Amino acid sequence: MILVTGATGNIGGELVRQLADSGQPVRALVRDGGALPPGVEAVTGDLNDAVSLRPALAGVTGVFLLPGYEDMPGVLAEARRAGAGRVVQLSGMSAGNEDTSNAITRYMAESERAARGSGLAWTIVRPAALMSNTFGWLPQLRAGNLVRAPFPRARAAVIDPADIAAVAAVALTAAGHDGAVYEVSGPQSLAPADRVAILGQTLGRDVRFEAQSDDEARAEMSQAMPAQYVDAFLSFYVGGTLDESRVLPTVADVTGRPPRTFRQWAEAHADAFR
């Protein structure tokens, strides 16, 4: 039995489906139910309250764990107490920078340290930016054919969450991945304007890209997140402290198949943008 946290999120939802399709018993940690594949057991619990996870962890052999919660060591201790043998810890590429002045890097690195010190067999997965972040453009695309977005010069080898999930599924169910740190990317390094152009071609629309200024980006992000995270993103994508542009072979090396292109992702999700 594998427990998937964040089981209705972009990565966790894909992981639940892939494990269930392969016949692996899956338990999905959710907040309030939701649609899950047949045979998947829904459980509730709070990742900020390790003791609350005891029923969800009972009898599990492996855990897929989201980063950034207050008591990661406590959650992992509960997993070990329940008899889990391994954890796949989701992280991010910035964790390799070890810049604790950056709030996002700090919580990623702290989550990784907790996994390494848990006494469980661990694998860490550090993805580049997710293709599913493109859903953030939906309100603009529903209003017209102009996408205004920040950080126009920040190229990223964006990755399909399904490919991240595929790497995690292998690490949870197959031998040979203990102690590995997998940085995973998609097959192309794309700027925001490139993604807009591909999405427009997929939809058959003349979608245009317009760059936000850094000041506009800061003001908009400040309405949705704490200042420390706004500063972190500006450090990454304006200050250049994070490089997500590298095209890496990891998905193919681990899963035996290449990662999906952004065009393939856009075609698979085109109906969501129409």
Image (spheres, rainbow, N blue to C red):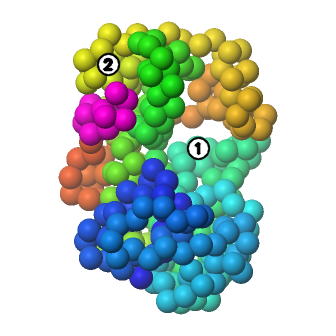
Can you say which quadrant of the picture contains the C terminus?
top left
Helix, strand or loop at label 2? It is helix
Circles 1 and 2: CB atoms closer than 8 Å: no
Q: Residue 170, position in %: x, y?
A: 33, 67
Residue depicted at x 55% and y 88%: 58
On screen, residue 59 above or below 129: below
User: Is residue 171 part of the magenta span, yes or no?
Assistant: no
Pick the residue in front: 166 or 252.
166
Res 94 label: 1
Q: Main secondary structure of the magenta part?
A: helix
Tally of numbered tags = 2
Q: Find residue 226 and report its image quarter.
A: top right
Q: Residue 136, position in %: x, y?
A: 51, 31
Query: Between tags 1 and 2, which lies in front?
Result: 2
Can you say which quadrant of the picture contains the N terminus?
bottom left
Q: Mark 2 sits on what residue? A: 200
Residue depicted at x 33% and y 24%: 199
Helix, strand or loop at label 1? It is helix
Q: Residue 224, position in %: x, y?
A: 70, 34
Span shown in magenta: 261-274
Mark 1 or 2, nearer chain start: 1
Q: Find residue 272 and report its image quarter.
A: top left
Q: Residues within 10 Å of mark 1 (few under 14, many from 20)?
A: many
